[in-house]
Amino acid sequence: MNFRRTLVKYTAALSVFFAGISAINVPSTVHADDVENTTVTTNNSISDLETTKPDSSSVKQESAATKKRNAVVKLVKKQIGKPYIYGAAGPSGFDCSGLTTYVFKNAINKTLPRTTYGQITLGKTISVSTKKLKKGDLLFWGNYHVGIYVGNGKFVHAPAPGQNVKQQTLASFYPSSAKRVID
């Protein structure tokens, strides 16, 4: 008998709970532009909702930079396997700065200086750390070699005569500096 009373009380509590939930109006379709951060006060009443909408211009700028970074990575990875040719800037072969010049121009229409010496003067200096680097950052070994960071501790570069464009890990050939040229 005690079990039945407990069950009846529990059922009554659940029906009150679900009746309260059914009064909440939830839209069936939500669009990204309509998303807002919502804070509900401790008494959970509808009249006490406080909403704020994120600054859409900052979201779009971040999205545009991310698209550019991804385009650079996609194109540089397509060059893997092509031969190193001294002084070449693609599309059939590359030297290191020819690779970066070609990729940035064709992926995001950004013109870089043709040489490593010119490219190292660009952008914002970034710590050479997988926590700080972003896809599309330029990596430098002194002022004589350049490659493109592609994420996950890896980069793509045109290493030297007799070799092909390849992807390597930072641990296998650690750069001395990095520059961010995509903002």
Image (cartoon, rainbow, N blue to C red):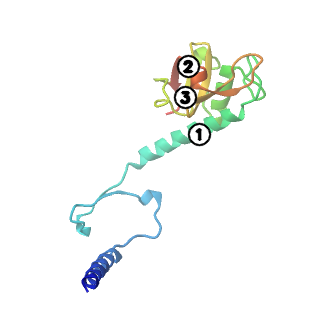
Residue 177 appears in the picture as rendered = yes
Name which of mark 2 and mark 1 comes first in the sequence: 1
Kind of residue sitting beneath label 3 = Asp
Residue 16 locus on image (x, y percent): 28, 79
Query: Crowding at label 2, few (<14), some or many (≥20) Cα neighbours within 10 Å?
Result: some
Q: Amino acid at mark 1?
A: Asn
The residue most toward the front is 1
In the displayed structure image, the side of residue 46 where residue 160 appears, left or right: right
Tags 2 and 1 touching, CB below 8 Å: no
Residue 157 sits in quarter: top right
Looking at this view, is 108 or 174 the one in front? 174
Q: First in sequence: mark 1 or mark 3?
A: 1
3D distance between C-alphas at marks 2 and 3: 12 Å
Residue 173: x, y in percent?
60, 20
Q: CA distance from mark 2 to mark 1?
A: 21 Å
| Residue sitting at the far bottom | 1
The residue wearing badge 3 is 137
- Residue flagged by tag 2: what amino acid is it? Pro
Element at badge 2? loop
Which of the two residues, 98 or 168, is positioned nearer the viewer here? Answer: 168
Give the percent coordinates (x, y) of residue 135. 55, 34
- When asked about the image quadrant of residue 48, the answer is bottom left
In x, y percent, where is residue 151? 56, 34
Q: Residues within 10 Å of mark 3 (few under 14, many from 20)?
A: many
**Residue 172 falls left or right of residue 27:** right
Work out whether residue 112 can be spotted: no
Residue at image location 37% in from the left, 50% down from the top: 54
